[in-house]
Image (tube, grey):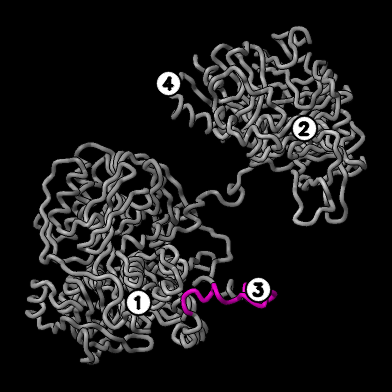
Amino acid sequence: MSASAKNLGAYRITGAGRLTPARTARFTFDGKSYTAMEGDTVASALLAHGVHLVGRSFKYHRPRGILSAGPEEPNALLDVSRDAARRQPNVRATVQEVFDGAKISSQNRWPSLSFDVGAVNNLFSPFFAAGFYYKTFMWPKEAWTKVYEPFIRRAAGLGVAPTEEDPDRYANRFAHCDLLIAGAGVAGLTAALSAAFTGVEVILVDEQPEVGGALHFDTSTTIDGQNGYDWAQDTAAKLRAMPNVRVLTRTTAFGYYNHGFLGLAERVSDHLDRPGRDTPRERLWQVRAKRVILATGSIERHMVFANNDRPGIMLASAARTFLNHHGVAVGRNVGVYTAHDSAYEAAFDLKRAGVHIAAIVDSRERPGEAVLEEARALGIKVLTGHSVADTAGRLRIRSMTVARNGNFDIRKIAVDALIVSAGWTPSVHLFSQSRGKLRWDEANRRFLPDVYAQDCVSIGACNGTDDLAEAIDEAITAGGGRIAVRGESRFAWTGGMIGSAEGAGPDTTVKAFVDFQHDVTAKDIRLAVREGMHSIEHIKRFTTNGMASDQGKLSNMHGLAIAAEMLDRPIPKVGLTTFRAPYTSVTYGTLVSHSRGKLFDPARKTPMHELEAAEGAEFEDVGNWKRAWYFPRRGEDMASAVNRECRTVRDVAGVFDASTLGKIEVVGPDAAQFLNLLYTNAWDTLQPGKCRYGIMTREDGFIYDDGVVGRLAEDRFHVTTTTGGAPRVLHHMEDYLQTEFPHLKVWLTSTTEQWAVIAVQGPRAREIIQPFVVGVDISNETFPHMSVAECTVMGVPARLFRMSFTGELGFEVNVPADYGPAVWKAIWELAKGMGGCLYGTESMHVLRAEKGYIIVGQDTDGTVTPDDAGLGWAVSKKKTDFVGIRGLKRPDLVRDGRKQLVGLRTNRPSDVLEEGAQIVADPNQPKPMTMLGHVTSAYWSENCGRSIAMALVAGGRERIGQTLYIPMRDRTIAVEVTDTVFFDKEGGRIHG
């Protein structure tokens, strides 16, 4: 080996792999410098230098090495950084590609990786058995907050979260396609090629930097006369050249949701030495696909035996990947422990590369004849019917102890690496996320896709199709095209096992690890069953098996089999854990994308926001909206400002920014019929030019939203909603229009942002707007309360509503948003000259409460019917159908004693109640007291000269005149139950 080759690592095999030594990268691991080839993963680069120890386990702090070569890796989770601000913990070394200048550190150890004080936990492991956390930290009670919880929180997790602001950019894209294919192995590529020739839009995604899937390690496969990997690259090049195909590598399909919606995470620049300033680090793809093909392959399982977690023990397919793709040998004297033929091929490849194979230990008596013959031809010792009973070595495996199954014929064999395989588990994660149902394949001891919930199909290894030719045919059929692809594999694999191997059975107490990251052993699974956990979901939570960042990709089937054995039940009867998104970890940056800082929760501002700010407004957050809260003058606090505003509105007039109200245009010949079905009251009787207050209920009969609806023409309605309800009401309408009433000719358009709304309320409101309105007579006789007209205001097209949320003469001027500031400014100047005021949301709340007007979400809580709120008059007695009509007839919704909205007057006028305060009939009753209801709205009313409140009280209307009590921390407040109207009970002021 040349000096330059040595710099690339002593375990780098000259002539092996697909990387070129001409392109290298320097990186550090725990402060020590190494050289890698471009295309190396961190795992392959470290293995090239003989580094197997990369981390410590979570609970016992046992030394851990690289186990796999893919996203299922549970051990090699590292901290990767470019600089102080660009650091990410828990990065899988088997996925992260080396880039020049990378600073990589191990985690979960102190003071160093080779000497970790936390390893003392391994000595005390009998005290940390599965479920110990459910039985400890229980006493003394006072120690929980001061000792136990702080300690547990410090111990939680493997890495250290960055504290610096993330300077990287992230991107987000939406895409639609006819066909999305997840997985670009033989099956996925064949399906993509087949589909592409039919002309459909195809997106092909694969998590690896290059396409090929298992062809990265499998050198015995040929397709169309080519080496399998070369065929894969050529096929990908053909697909990329086609205008209807998009190939995305380094892209993980992490979530499969309803209606063909998939989430993809693309690693755009994590592998680059110096990404461009405008290059995103990662990109989130949100794809809506008409059809999905799942070609996600299968995942190799490890063998469960004593001390199977030492550094140097890894999956056979991983060793094969590191050799055949990266050109790295995992050791010089390698042992093999298997129950499946695939591990033999790994041994063959290593042997041909010059690596000594100490022995192949096969737990089966009869492996496949073809692999046995090849082993003999290569001079490899094969021990059939044997098991690895134990291993030795502190920071790396030194030897394996081999025993004949069923007896004590034990021998120790020196090794510096041990590769293992218990067979392959179909990767059904995305299929399960799509809500598909699995079936149990007893012959091969695996779960396979069965009942599909969406328009998708599984092909290849993830569908249990093991034969290459059959998988290719399956893929061509799934793609829908007519192409010819011929593939051959040298060996047909047989075998496989799940559960613990010989020497790690129920009669042993050895540490045979099932879940490496969470230190879950076979005996932990058995303990959970003895403790009474008979459901696999309970066993999972008791032991934390499958709850680590790898989500049980390696451990689930083993844990399930061990539990089934203990329970003496068939595996399907024990159940299967739920596969949840994401399939692999996704960074917060990818999911959040641009939604950071000011864009994390964008503030919505009305067109008049800056003018209101100039007038001294204080603002409050109402959802995303910034709304003027109150307008203090010099020397005023909030209470003084609100009192002044409320008096002025009642005495003169006030100007209010109502632009945030939701506005929906409902248009079409069936618009009135549609609203009849969505609201409790009637709309076909409403004449153009008139408005009506409407209540919207859910199917269960409870109030969902309310608002005033104006009819502009026979086929056009201007619907207003609550500020917070605008998006959900539009969604509610669209949902029913598309699913329940698709026959109606109606179109819905959100116009919330299109209209600036200036409400002028008070005795002089007509005088204030009169000079600006052209095209409509707004006299009381011609334009009475609850009228609407299209006109011009200051020459601007407008919609003028005569409506009121204060109980005063009121108008709401709707003008296009761009003209809102100019119109508002003119109206305010005239109002100010008359002695009027600007008022904000706090005064609006007080004024509406004085009149007993409800606010949905404050005076309702999702269990209030229109009658409960005193709005039974708004429910049509003539309509035969509307959303909620059947719900309103349920016995519980019409029974006596329901909570009803009433008013409350405190015995002491100065007492202002707390919203949410509970109400009782007898303050001296023993605890727990019987609660009759709670206060929903409470204010000081300057116009009434006292406090006022509204409340939901059981049998409220029957209690009018009674005295009830509100227990507070320092006193009990007596209140009289009243109706909800506190000001202008006759209601004459609203008619001007």
Determine the secondary structure under disc 4. loop
Residue in the image at 10% along x and 53% along y: 486
Q: Residue at x 57, y 51 (%)?
A: 596
Identify which amino acid the numbered label 3 is placed on.
Answer: Trp
Amino acid beneath label 2: Arg
Q: Reading the chain from its start, which is encountered first: label 4 or label 2?
A: 4
Q: Where is residue 465 in the image (x, y as percent from the top left)?
A: 19, 56
Please identify the quadrant where the C terminus is shown.
top right
Label 3 residue SS? helix
Q: Which amino acid does label 1 sit on?
A: Leu
First of labels 3, 1 by sequence position: 1
How many numbered marks does the figure carry? Answer: 4
The local crowd at label 4, few if under 14, some if 14 to 19, many if 20 or more residues have their Cα within 10 Å, is few
Circle 2 residue: 957
Using residue 858 as the reference point, say whether residue 332 is left or right of it: left
Q: In which quarter of the image is residue 713?
A: top right
Along the polypeptide, which appears first: circle 3 or circle 4? 3
Residue occupied by mark 3 = 144
Q: Pinpoint residue 786: horizontal percent, then vertical percent.
A: 71, 17
Res 921 → quadrant: top right
Mark 3–mark 1 Cα distance, whole angstroms, equals: 42 Å
Label 2 element class: helix
Q: Distance between the residues labelled 4 and 2?
A: 42 Å
**Occupied quadrant, residue 796:** top right
